[in-house]
């Protein structure tokens, strides 16, 4: 089962994923993405994701298209090495923005969170 927890950090929505992005497990992720408040960026935290199958890759691509159509930036953080390799082998590492951590957050958002 894939659990998705949403946190709003200023105008950025952080989606913490817990589980695997597999066929039969993605409905909750799609629902959260469709019901996001107005935001400038969506960040998916993959630190607790070990597997993504072909269906999951398709869902992530759909999410990217949905985000782009709304002018929203979609980024992945904390992607494990085996998933990074999957994105590299499928050449999706050139499609998705994949970061090591949260350095992409504007300093103003980080200041507000820390305060």
Image (spheres, rainbow, N blue to C red):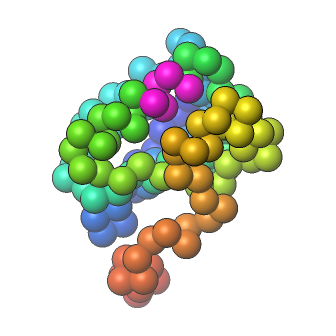
Residue 33 position in % (x across, y down): 34, 37
Q: Nearer the viewer, residue 111 or 3?
A: 111
**With respect to residue 81, does 1 lie above or below?**
above
58 drawn magenta: yes
Residue 109 position in % (x across, y down): 37, 77
Residue drawn at x 34%, y 34% is: 65
Residue 56 visible (yes or no) = yes
Residue 1 visible (yes or no) = no
Residue drawn at x 65%, y 20% is: 53
**With respect to residue 2, does 43 lie above or below?**
below
Kindly give the residue lying farthest to the top in the view shown. Answer: 24
Residue 2 position in % (x across, y down): 56, 29
Residue 104 position in % (x across, y down): 49, 69
Query: Does 12 sit left or right of 37 as displayed?
Result: right
**With respect to residue 91, does 24 lie above or below?**
above
67 drawn magenta: no
Query: Does 26 sit left or right of 33 as displayed?
Result: right
Secondary structure, magenta segment, majority class: helix
Magenta segment boundaries in residue numbering: 57-61
Quarter of the image containing the N terminus?
top right
Residue drawn at x 46%, y 48% is: 15
Query: Does 43 sit left or right of 67 as displayed?
Result: right
């Amino acid at each position: 089962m894939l659990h998705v927890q949403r946190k709003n950090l200023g105008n950025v929505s952080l989606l913490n994923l817990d589980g695997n992005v597999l066929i039969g497990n993605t409905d909750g992720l799609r629902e959260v993405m469709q019901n996001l408040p107005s935001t400038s960026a969506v960040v998916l935290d993959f630190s607790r994701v070990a597997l993504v199958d072909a269906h999951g890759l398709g869902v992530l691509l759909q999410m990217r298209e949905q985000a782009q159509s709304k002018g929203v930036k979609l980024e992945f953080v904390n992607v494990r090495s085996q998933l990074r390799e999957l994105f590299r082998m499928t050449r999706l590492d050139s499609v998705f923005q994949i970061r090591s951590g949260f350095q992409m957050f504007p300093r103003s958002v980080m200041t507000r969170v820390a305060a």
